[in-house]
Amino acid sequence: MSNENTEEIQQKKSVRHILALSGGKDSSALAIYMKGKIPNVEYCFCDTEKELEETYEYLNKLETYLGQKIHHLKYSSGYGFDEIVQIKGGFLPSPEQRWCTEYLKLKPYEDYIGDDPVVSYVGIRADEPHRTGYISNKPNVKTVFPFVEDNVRLEDVERILEESGLGVPSYYKWRSRSGCFFCFYQQKREWVGLLENHPDLFEEAKKYEKIDPHTGERYTWNQGESLDELARPERVAQIKENYEKRKARKANAFKGNQKLKDVWGDDSDDGENLSCNICHL
Ligand code: SF4
């Protein structure tokens, strides 16, 4: 690593070095990349208890590879996701009202850090200029981005994971990000992936959706479409077809222009690569 500040901080014995894992490819690759380079590193994972089974399996494999425990941090408020939804009268989180991240990811992480001086290692890549990741306002936390410092890009992350023997988590076959099985940042084709790979979890996600009998207000994970509507065979076929068309269009549009592809080359449903920079690294 080339950043002098990071090296200076690493030499101070009282400083804690924490690498938070999301169960996704970038933070996992960062842990592998930094293995042996960070003194007294602590690994942690903010566990919402609504994660995919594949995520837990992958973290177990990673733990074995790293030869060190990954601390699972649970909500510290005493209330899990289901209790909070109830308190909020069934109001589901959304990109605009992201209370789930605050209660189930940020708070447990900040409680774990406490007031100790901390260097927090974040897996944002050099080819993700549009992302910022977890940046604490706490004065005792310094956030560092080793992949940005060392110009590590997507192809490097894939190579790191491949060479470690771990590969990418298996959910990447049908989903592009880590996080809760019902995450509202999922694209429509990922909801279809959940339906096809984990029908039981799809049913679980459906149970959170409600229609207020008095006002007619709908509490759904996707704006304007319930999971019942999305799961209709004709709608599933349409979502798959749209996805394939979009993929082909984008492959053409970004041909030979890597810089453009870095910024806009996602495969989201609406052209915006919306995601949570805390949950999806
Ligand atoms: S993964 Fe999605 S649903 Fe889960 S805490 Fe993060 S933003 Fe919320």
Image: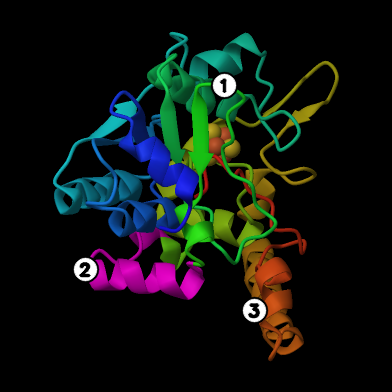
* Scheme of colours in the image: rainbow
Residue 139 in the image: state x and y as whole percent: 57, 21
Q: Residue furthest right?
A: 215
- Residue 17 is situated, as x and y percent measured from the top left of the image, at 35, 34
Give the structural element (helix, strand or loop) at label 1: loop
Task: Nearest to the eye among marks 3 and 1: give it.
Answer: 1
Identify which residue, 192 or 161, lies in the foreground.
Answer: 161
Viewer-closest of 185 and 226: 185
Ligand 1 shown in quarter: top right
| Residue bounds of the magenta highlight | 152-171
- Where, by quadrant of the figure, is residue 53 drawn? top left
- Residue at image coords 77%, 30%: 218
- Give the numbered dot on residue 139: 1
Q: CA distance from mark 2 to mark 3?
A: 30 Å
Residue 227: image location, x then y, percent: 63, 45
Is 169 covered by the magenta stretch? yes
Local secondary structure at mark 3:
helix
Residue 244: mark in rendering: 3
Nearest the eye: 192 or 46: 46
Amino acid of disc 1: Pro
Residue shown at the point (46%, 49%) measured from the top left: 4
Does mark 3 have its CB less than 8 Å from ligand 1? no
Q: Which residue is mark 2?
A: 165
Q: Marks 2 and 1, Cα distance to the nearest angstrom?
A: 38 Å
Name which residue type carries label 3. Answer: Glu
Q: CA distance from mark 3 to mark 1?
A: 46 Å
Name which quarter of the figure residue 216 lies in: top right
Q: Is residue 47 above or below residue 130?
A: above
Residue nearer the viewer, 195 or 63: 63
From the viewer's perspective, is the residue at label 2 or at label 3 nearer? Answer: 2
